Image (cartoon, helix red, strand yellow):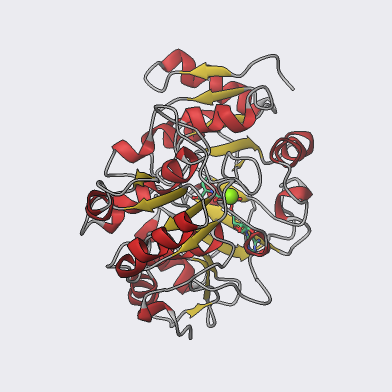
Amino acid sequence: TYSATTVFSPTSEIDIAEAAAALRDGHLLAFPTETVYGLGANALTPSAVSAIFRAKGRPSDNPLIVHVSSLSDLTRWPLTPLPLSPAAARLAKAFWPGPLTLVLPLAARSPLAAAVTAGLRSVALRVPKHPVAAALLAKAAVPVAAPSANRSGRPSPTSAAHVIRDLDGAVFGVVDAGDLALDDANCGVESTVVDMTDPHNPSVLRPGAVSVRELERVSGVPFREVERGQAVERPKAPGMKYRHYAPVAPMTIVERTRVKERLEEERRKGKLVGVLANDAVCEQLREVSGVVTVNCGREGDVASFARELYGALRAFDGEGKGRMEKVAIILAVPPPDTGDGIGAAVMNRLVKASAGSVESIPESLKSSH
Ligand code: TXA
Ligand code: MG
């Protein structure tokens, strides 16, 4: 542990150089990506990697994503056998840098610390697009293992303040690029994770901004969706079996047509109710008393809902601007236009954060295939 976490400026070359050197030398460093803030460690250094698990309180059977600065880094370190399968190569070419993680076979002579892959024979690889992540990875010049920079079970961080809130003193430094929700170039939810270990039978392990339709179009191969909204019995991404993204108060997913009625019901039980919903729904509830609304995104713009989701969940725990009363229950109203891609990712995170408490869910998500 450190006496305090150093805050680095993304616009100072000196700061980026210092942060990159610390990362290379085995210190934990949190940094922004276009999805969420990551908690980085030199993936070649066993003590640095085990520090990630300690800082997060993360179960050791949950492997980490390895971040590199470009596809050509795969020729520099033997992380996965080359050449990539044609399908994996097409995905890497099309979506890197970007919010796509490829799970690939682990190279026989991989230099990665064993804890990175949690003893599996596969490795998850990603090339982030956020300019600060790109600059840092280029300067560090080592593969960087990085999960989201939250304590296990908490909503992922989309600002440096979220990182400090969860990990102050447990991490050497954080590169502070501010609130990711403020820039349309960011996603706000974690990368799409796809299992390409068998390139003829690939699957989506975690939905994200890169949609199944795009994956199939680019790779030319049909994808199985391991997870779509609902929980699965045997998760293939080890991380998917744990409760995730959760605020302190219990949360339940409610359709917008039912939110007023459900609100009254809870209030009659004497509960202070929280509502997480987009601007249009929050506006409809403006006159209703005994309810604390947290605005998440704009009507007709599901990407803005995704960008603001984790910040909104954290607001119910008293993070962010202004003081907020502690609510006894949160009613989450999903955006109406959830489809493939970012919409499916939003629904998946809401279901996880509510521990599967879904009172009404869009028809499109009821049947998984
Ligand atoms: O957007 C993101 O992916 C962010 C940023 C920081 O890059 N990172 C992130 O990492 O979300 P994390 O650790 O919170 O989630 C990684 C997911 C977990 O569900 C984990 O189980 C899965 O990827 N995973 C990692 N390695 C795997 C492997 N070899 N096989 C299957 N799943 C794997
Ligand atoms: Mg995470």
Residue 9 visible from this viewpoint:
yes
Q: Is residue 253 left or right of residue 24?
A: left
| Residue in view at x 76 percent, y 38 percent | 54
| Residue in view at x 71 percent, y 49 percent | 116
Residue 341 visible from this viewpoint:
no
Q: Is residue 175 above or below residue 294?
A: above
| Residue in view at x 37 percent, y 20 percent | 11
Q: Is residue 176 above or below residue 130?
A: above
Where on the picture, by quarter, is residue 335? bottom left
Residue 323 image position (x, y, % from top left): 44, 28
Q: In front here: 134 or 309?
A: 309
Residue 111 image position (x, y, % from top left): 72, 47
| Residue in view at x 78 percent, y 58 percent | 119
Residue 247 image position (x, y, % from top left): 55, 47
Q: In front here: 111 or 339?
A: 339
Which image quadrant: the N terminus?
A: top right
Q: Is residue 81 left or right of residue 347?
A: right
Q: How many numbered discs?
A: 0
Q: Quadrant of ligand 1?
A: bottom right
Residue 165 image position (x, y, % from top left): 57, 29
Where on the picture, by quarter, is residue 353? bottom right
